[in-house]
Image (cartoon, rainbow, N blue to C red):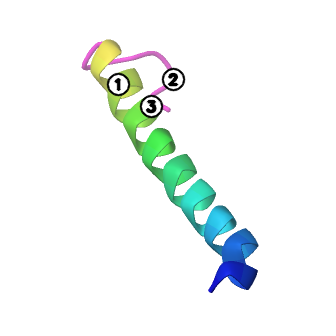
């Protein structure tokens, strides 16, 4: 189990990155007006 610490490190890092990406998108979308410019 301890030998695969690197694998678990990347799994946790990827999970954190995905969660941070979703949270950032939610916050960014909430800050934009309903009809934002260029509708990204």
- Give above or below for 1 relative to 39: below
- Give above or below for 22 relative to 39: below
Residue 40, percent from left and from top: 50, 32
Residue at coordinates 45% horizontally, 31% vertically from top-left? 24
Q: Which element type, helix, strand or loop, lies under badge 1? A: helix
Look at discs 3 and 2 and give the one toward the viewer.
3
Residue at coordinates 25% horizontally, 19% vertically from top-left? 34
The image quadrant of residue 32 is top left
> Who is closer to the viewer here, 30 or 18?
18
Kindly report the distance in space between the C-alpha atoms of the residues bearing marks 2 and 1.
Answer: 18 Å
Q: Which element type, helix, strand or loop, lies under badge 2? A: loop
Q: Disc 3 or 2, which lies upstream in sequence? A: 3
Kindly report the distance in space between the C-alpha atoms of the residues bearing marks 3 and 2.
Answer: 19 Å
Q: Disc 2 or 1, which lies upstream in sequence? A: 1
Q: Is there a contact, CB below 8 Å, between mark 3 and mark 2?
A: no
Q: Which residue is mark 3?
A: 24
Instruction: Report the magenta residues as a range.
Output: 33-40
Tell me if 21 is positioned left or right of 2 in this view. Answer: left
Residue at coordinates 33% horizontally, 14% vertically from top-left? 31
Q: Within 10 angstroms of label 2, few (less than 14), some, or many (20 or more) residues?
A: few
């Amino acid at each position: 189990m301890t030998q695969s610490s690197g694998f678990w490190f990347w799994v946790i890092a990827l999970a954190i990155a995905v969660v941070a990406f979703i949270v950032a998108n939610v916050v960014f979308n909430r800050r934009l007006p309903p009809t934002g410019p260029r509708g990204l």
